[in-house]
């Protein structure tokens, strides 16, 4: 499945448990020798009463991510369809997320407010998360926040003029970020429109990033760059809509799609 080209291999592990090891994850996500994808997702039974399911998120290097909001939208779409419900809750390592349909091919998520304190990002030592004293080429003074997973947002005058892999990778590996971070490079083109590209952990350029889109809008508001509550975020794969509520909780809306489905050989 994909959300604006941010693509996932989704495995339903509810009937047959699936605990993929790092070498299998790397193989499945490899675009040359495997299926190819930005992450491998496993749907499991929830561990607490209430949610429709639990989703595990594995990055292309085999590490586990706490949150991926495009993945949450994709898996929620499956769960909403199979239960015919008008609302479900999905359990992730990053917390519980509520999802509702948005037309036949879209999903809206309702998310808790982000965390801004340096310990929650996490950073290696105390710092002003609104403008960190870090830079890499044209990327300077990023804003740090945690939406279940860590994000740094760097505002630039022209997103297309930045060599994102070159400069964002140095920030991502900085010693101030013991768990790394997803690095957003954002350009405010109007008070209600951002252009964004995200260099995700563990070092991939994605077509779109749901948590990155929310992070960019929240950071733009906190930095006083805009006071709009409803912002369109334009990424290489398409647009997502982000609405920020009074308590800083968030609604994220956009399309999802199934690319194809199949069966894995069990003897790999
Ligand atoms: N690679 C990430 C999570 C991916 C975020 C995502 N694409 C989204 O849509 O939110 C991590 O390690 O945190």
Image: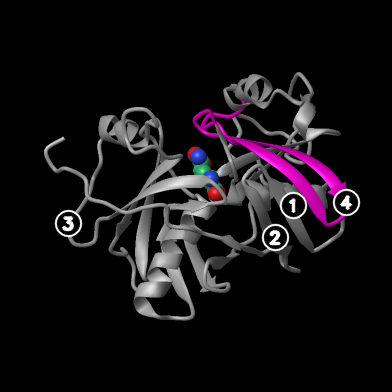
| Proximity of marks 2 and 4: CB atoms separated by less than 8 Å | no
As for residue 126 lying within the magenta part, the answer is no
Q: Return the residue at label 3.
A: 16
| Mark found first going from the N terminus, 1 or 4 | 4
Q: Return the residue at label 1.
A: 217
| Residue drawn at the location 60% of the way across and 50% of the way down | 211
Crowd around label 3: few <14 · some 14–19 · many ≥20 (10 Å): few
Q: CA distance from mark 1 to mark 4?
A: 12 Å
Magenta stretch, residue numbers: 176-204
| Proximity of marks 1 and 4: CB atoms separated by less than 8 Å | no
Location of residue 216 with respect to 108 vertically, above or below: above
Please, which residue is most extreme toward the front here? Answer: 260
Q: Return the residue at label 2.
A: 242
- As rendered, which of 58 and 258 lies closer to the eye? 258
Mark 2 CB near ligand 1 (8 Å cut): no
Location of residue 92 with respect to 138 vertically, above or below: below
Secondary structure of the residue carrying numbered label 1: helix
| Mark found first going from the N terminus, 1 or 3 | 3
Query: What is the quadrant of residue 205 in the picture?
Result: top right
| Mark found first going from the N terminus, 4 or 3 | 3
| Mark found first going from the N terminus, 2 or 4 | 4
Crowd around label 2: few <14 · some 14–19 · many ≥20 (10 Å): many
Q: CA distance from mark 2 to mark 4?
A: 14 Å
| Proximity of marks 2 and 1: CB atoms separated by less than 8 Å | yes
Residue 39 position, x and y percent, is 42, 42
Query: What is the quadrant of residue 198 in the picture?
Result: top right
Residue 235 position, x and y percent, is 68, 45
Q: CA distance from mark 3 to mark 2?
A: 36 Å
Location of residue 154 with respect to 18 vertically, above or below: above
């Amino acid at each position: 499945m994909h959300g604006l080209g941010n693509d996932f291999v989704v495995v339903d592990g509810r009937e047959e448990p699936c605990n993929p090891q790092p070498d299998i994850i790397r193989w499945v996500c490899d675009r040359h020798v495997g299926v190819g994808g930005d992450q491998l997702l496993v749907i499991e039974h929830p561990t607490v009463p209430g949610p429709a399911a639990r989703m595990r998120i594995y990055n292309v290097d085999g590490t586990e991510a706490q949150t991926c909001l495009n993945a949450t939208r994709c898996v929620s779409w499956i769960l909403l369809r199979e239960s015919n419900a008008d609302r479900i809750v999905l359990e992730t390592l990053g917390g519980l997320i509520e999802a509702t349909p948005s037309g036949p091919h879209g999903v809206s998520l309702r998310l808790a407010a982000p965390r801004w304190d340096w310990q929650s990002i996490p950073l290696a030592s105390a710092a002003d998360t609104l403008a960190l004293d870090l830079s890499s080429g044209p990327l300077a003074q990023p804003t740090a926040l945690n939406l279940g997973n860590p994000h740094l947002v760097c505002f630039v005058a022209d997103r297309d003029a930045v060599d994102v892999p070159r400069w964002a990778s140095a920030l991502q590996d900085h010693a101030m970020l013991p768990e790394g971070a997803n690095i957003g490079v954002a350009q405010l083109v109007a008070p209600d429109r951002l252009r964004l590209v995200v260099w995700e952990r563990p070092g991939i350029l994605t077509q779109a990033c749901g948590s990155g889109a929310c992070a960019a809008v929240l950071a733009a508001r906190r930095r006083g760059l805009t006071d709009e509550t409803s912002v369109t975020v334009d990424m290489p794969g398409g647009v997502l809509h982000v609405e920020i509520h009074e308590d800083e909780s968030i609604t994220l809306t956009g399309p999802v799609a199934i690319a194809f489905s199949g069966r894995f050989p069990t003897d790999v």
